[in-house]
Amino acid sequence: IGMNIMRSVHRLLSPLIYRDGTAIVPAQVAPEWAERQFLRRLLHRLRVDCVIDVGANVGQYANILRLIGFQGTILSFEPSPQIFAKLASASAHDDRWHVFDSALGAEAGTIEFNIMEASEFSSVRQPTRRDTAQFESDNQVVERIHVAIERLDQVLPRLRDAYGFQRPFLKTDTQGFDIEVLRGAAGVHRELAGIECELAIKELYVDVKP
């Protein structure tokens, strides 16, 4: 049922593209249309059959992947327990979308994690308003918890065995922790078809320079 709904939404929000390259784009998706079309073409050109979605939050990126027509495996990682529950619910009707309640980084074990007022800002890093106060109310710590953390180069082999993919693509959106995710993938960099990092252009976290 879930996949049928996603396909219906995809049809409703799909632009009409003409032979001369012009397009009529639904207003709901117009602001992000060019970026999404680039991602669609990139995943197709790289022959990606699995997207590793690190910093998944409630599944926004995974939903975009389905909207642009990606039908492969999605592996989403989200360490915040409350947000993970929403992520698990979002993925429940998609048998090729699997979710994991841990962080990825450079060292396996446990790590302190900051729950922010707005969940999309939650991070291992400490927030700062040194560069901008634009997100002051959202990017402030409301709770600190300890979460499990793993290295991607340690978990990738067992994920491949479990889900049978060959061409994984890594996406990270970890609010200042992306370099640590990449360090933890050092042993499998050559096995990744591509990497996408969502990075801030302002310093939102202590000692994380844009």
Image (tube, rainbow, N blue to C red):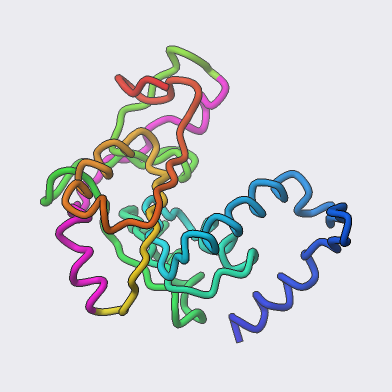
Q: Which residues are magenta?
A: 134-161
Please identify the residue farthest to the front as the structure is shown: 20
Question: In screen coordinates, is 123 left or right of 155?
Answer: right
Question: In screen coordinates, is 93 left or right of 183?
Answer: right
Q: Is residue 52 magenta?
A: no
Q: Is residue 155 magenta?
A: yes
Picture quadrant where residue 87 is located: bottom left
Residue 13, position as x, y percentages in the image: 78, 64
Residue at image location 19% in from the left, 68% down from the top = 157
Question: In screen coordinates, is 199 left or right of 14?
Answer: left
Residue at image location 34% in from the left, 53% down from the top = 80
Picture quadrant where residue 12 is located: bottom right
Residue 71, position as x, y percentages in the image: 53, 75
Q: Is residue 94 above or below residue 61?
A: below
Front residue of this view, candidates 112 and 158: 158
Question: In screen coordinates, is 199 left or right of 124?
Answer: right
Residue at image location 33% in from the left, 39% down from the top = 178
